[in-house]
Structures are given as C-alpha cells and as structure tokens.
Image: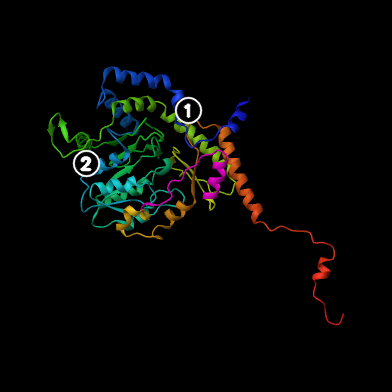
C-alpha cells in the first residue's frame, strides 16, 4: 500500500516519542548499557559531559543538571538570592510551574499579560509592574519562541533586577542569533520527555555564565554539599540522573536537525491553514522559533478538538486555565478580566500534532480536517434560498383595498 494511504489510515498522535527512539535506538541502548555496566548512577561522568555540552550549545559557561524544569527555575532563583519579601514578574499564560518555582522560594509571583501576536511578555506591562519589591523578571519563552529580550534585559539593568529565563520550551531557539539560555543572568530548561530535547523521565538544567550561581545550584541540588559530608547550605535532593544525562547527550547531537524539521512542519501547517477559518501562530522576525508547540486560535476550539478526535487526530490545550485563575493562586487577588489577552487565548487555543518525525501526509490530513470543519460551520450559518411553490406569493400577499 502506498505511504500516503497508510498515513491516512493511521491515527495522528499529538507527539510520537517512539518514532524518535526508533531512529536512534542503537545509540541509546549502547549508552544505557554503558551506565548499567559501570553502575555509575548518581552524578556520573555522563552528567558532567552533558552539562558541559549543553552549556556550550546554549552559549553559556556553565550547566548544572537537576531533576526537573521546575527545580531548575527554583534553584536558579535561590542561587540569585531571591526569597521572602521579593517579587518576581512573569507571564500569566505560562504553565503553572513558572509561578510555583517563585512561590517555593518564598517570593511573590507578579503576573502580567502578554503580546497578542507572540504570546510572550508584554514589555510595557512588565515596566508597569515593577515595584520597590521587585527582585527579578522571569520571561517565559513560550511554545519555542523567545520573549523580546532586549528591552527586558535593559529594564532589568536599569532597576538592578535579575533575569531568569524560563526556557523550558525553547531548547535551541534563538533571539537575534543568540540561543535561549544566554540572554539573561541564568536560565532553566526542562527535559520532560515531550520537549524538543527530552529525557526518558524527568530532568532539567540551569545554565549560566555566573560561576557563583553555578556553584550555588550545584551544592543546592546535592544536599547542600560542596564535597562529600561537607554541607555548606541547607540543600535538596534534586540531581539529574546519570541514565537521563547519557540519553540526553546522545539526543543533543540531533537537536538542531530536529528543530529544523519542526520549522518545516510549521511552514507547511501555516500555508495549508491560510484560509481554514483559524488564526495561525506568528514567529517574530528576530527569532528562530523551535516550535515546541504549534497552536492555532478558533472560537470553536472545543468542537473542533472533538471533531478531530473523532477522526483519529489528537490535539492539546496549552493552557486552558491561566495561572491567575487557578485556585492555588486565589490569594494573589487577580480575577477574571485582569489579563484579557491571556484569558482570550486560553479559550481559543488548540495545539496541533507537532514533533520532528511528523509526516507531511499527516500535516495535510490534519489541515484538511480543520478546513472541512470550518467549511461545515459556514454551511450551517449561511441562509439558504428555498424555492417557493407556485402560487405561494399570491396566496400570502396581503389583499389591497379596492381590488
């Protein structure tokens, strides 16, 4: 059977992690076997190699592997001395872990709205939110697109603030030629399996060019010790596993090519959906987007998602409830209407299947299904001209007096 027909018969999954594994299976099995044979499970040699390689990839001097993206955010903030009484400005439309990391260090998340086109921090809103208690800005590089970093860094410098990039969705993305992770004082990455660079479990990393920050994170992640049994800080157990580091070291070699494939997929989606009744995402001209997610906007989001699901097409919503409307953050005092761009997008966004190995045939199938759905809506709402039976007009016309 021709490939195109096979693709039409298969379900279109949101992300196919097994497809990536099959392409690098022999390499992955080899490095896992090496770790198993040496029993080098905790902070082994693969961790240090991956830390050095990923920091170099980002254009930073140091990398410190931790157990998750949220831990990376939290430990970066702690290493910069952010804590009780401080405020940290971040985006209202991020995954809730961005705010949780701020709360975990004892600081207060100060949420702001985002730009309608790019869904990244609105710089004017950040400027308006700065107070005497502000200690840091956490720009979120959402869906694989970097925030407008130049004015953010300039604002931070003017007010003496720390910039911690939430780069958990932006592995390899660039802003004016510079990679995510090299634009702020430090940055946090997540290696959750579905990320552009994903482990086979949880994992994360702090990257920075500040030696003191790197040293602080390194001790904080490992029970606060700078050497065995010598605890210089009250620390945590938040280490990156050697097995995960070994897997990530293999995958890092392929990241740029995988990101290039995602960009090709995004171009094809945008072209096919041009007249499909949806709003397609925008990539800022100064950014090299890595398309962790490809999100469209439609007023018929839930109905469209159900229609696609019935046809074997899996989608996602990132994110249906903004941070400020989560029960966990009622105490911040925000309510409905505080962040209109974020709230409108939360009701309209739908994430389409996106991963490097996604086929063009599947992108065409998804796009045609979306076009057909909206064409059906147009037919339902367009008034129909129904022919009248002969004599109907004469029978229904009012009688004129005198005739």
User: Which quadrant of the structure image shows residue 402?
Assistant: bottom right
Tag 2, which secondary structure? helix
Q: Residue furthest bottom?
A: 402
- Residue numbers of the magenta segment: 302-323
Q: Where residue 3 sits in the image (x, y, percent)?
A: 60, 27
Q: Where residue 123 sits in the image (x, y, percent)?
A: 37, 52
**Residue at the disc numbered 2:** 79
Q: Is residue 181 visible?
A: no
Q: Residue at x 39, y 54 (%)?
A: 113
Q: Is residue 68 visible?
A: yes
> Does 8 sit left or right of 403 as displayed?
left
Q: Where residue 237 sits in the image (x, y, percent)?
A: 22, 35
Establish if 365 lies above or below 346. above
**Closer to the N terminus: mark 1 or mark 2?**
1
**Distance of mark 1 from mark 2, alpha carbons?**
38 Å
Q: Residues within 10 Å of mark 1 (few under 14, many from 20)?
A: some
User: Which quadrant of the structure image shows residue 111?
Assistant: bottom left
Quadrant housing the C terminus: bottom right
Q: Nearer the viewer, residue 8 or 181?
A: 8
Tag 1, which secondary structure? helix
Establish if 379 lies above or below 177. below
User: Which quadrant of the structure image shows residue 71?
Assistant: top left
Q: Residues within 10 Å of mark 2 (few under 14, many from 20)?
A: many
Establish if 168 lies above or below 124. above
Q: Residue at x 32, y 60 (%)?
A: 333
Quadrant housing the N terminus: top right
Q: Where residue 118 sits in the image (x, y, percent)?
A: 44, 48
**Residue at the disc numbered 1:** 19
> Does 25 sit left or right of 34 as displayed?
right
Q: Residue at x 37, y 60 (%)?
A: 335
Whether the magenta-drawn stretch holds residue 319 is answered as yes
């Amino acid at each position: 059977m021709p490939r195109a027909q096979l693709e039409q018969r298969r379900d279109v999954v949101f992300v196919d992690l097994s497809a990536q594994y099959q392409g690098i299976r022999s390499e992955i099995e080899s490095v896992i076997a090496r770790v198993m044979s040496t029993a080098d499970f905790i902070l082994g040699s693969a961790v240090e190699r991956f830390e050095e390689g990923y920091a170099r990839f980002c254009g930073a001097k140091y990398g410190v592997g931790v157990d998750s993206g949220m831990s990376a955010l939290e430990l970066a903030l702690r290493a910069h001395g952010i804590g009780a009484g401080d405020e940290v400005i971040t985006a209202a439309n991020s995954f809730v872990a961005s705010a949780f990391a701020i709360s975990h260090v004892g600081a207060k998340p100060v949420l702001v709205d985002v730009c309608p086109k790019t869904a990244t921090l609105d710089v004017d809103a950040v400027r308006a939110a700065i107070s005497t208690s502000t200690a840091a800005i956490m720009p979120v590089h959402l869906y694989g697109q970097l925030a407008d970093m130049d004015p953010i860094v300039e604002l931070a410098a003017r007010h003496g603030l720390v910039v911690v990039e939430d780069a958990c969705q932006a592995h390899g993305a660039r802003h004016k030629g510079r990679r995510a992770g090299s634009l702020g004082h430090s940055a946090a990455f997540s290696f959750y399996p579905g990320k552009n660079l994903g482990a086979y479990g949880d994992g994360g990393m702090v990257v920075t060019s500040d030696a003191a920050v790197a040293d602080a994170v390194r001790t904080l992640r490992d029970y606060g010790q700078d050497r065995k049994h010598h605890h210089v800080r009250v620390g945590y157990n938040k280490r990156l596993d050697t097995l995960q580091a070994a897997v990530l070291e293999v995958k890092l070699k392929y990241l740029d090519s995988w990101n290039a494939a995602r960009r090709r997929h995004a171009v094809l989606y945008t072209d096919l959906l041009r007249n499909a009744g949806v709003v397609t995402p925008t990539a800022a001209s100064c950014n090299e987007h890595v398309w962790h997610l490809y999100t469209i906007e439609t007023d018929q989001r839930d109905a469209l998602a159900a229609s696609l699901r019935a046809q074997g097409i899996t989608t996602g919503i990132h994110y249906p409830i903004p941070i400020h409307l989560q029960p966990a953050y009622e105490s911040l005092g925000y309510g409905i209407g505080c962040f209109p761009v974020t709230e409108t997008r939360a009701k309209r966004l739908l994430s389409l299947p996106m991963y490097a190995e996604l086929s063009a045939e599947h992108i065409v199938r998804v796009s045609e299904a979306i076009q057909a759905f909206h064409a059906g809506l147009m037919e339902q709402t367009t008034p129909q001209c129904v022919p009248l039976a002969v004599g109907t007009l004469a029978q229904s016309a009012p009688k004129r007096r005198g005739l």
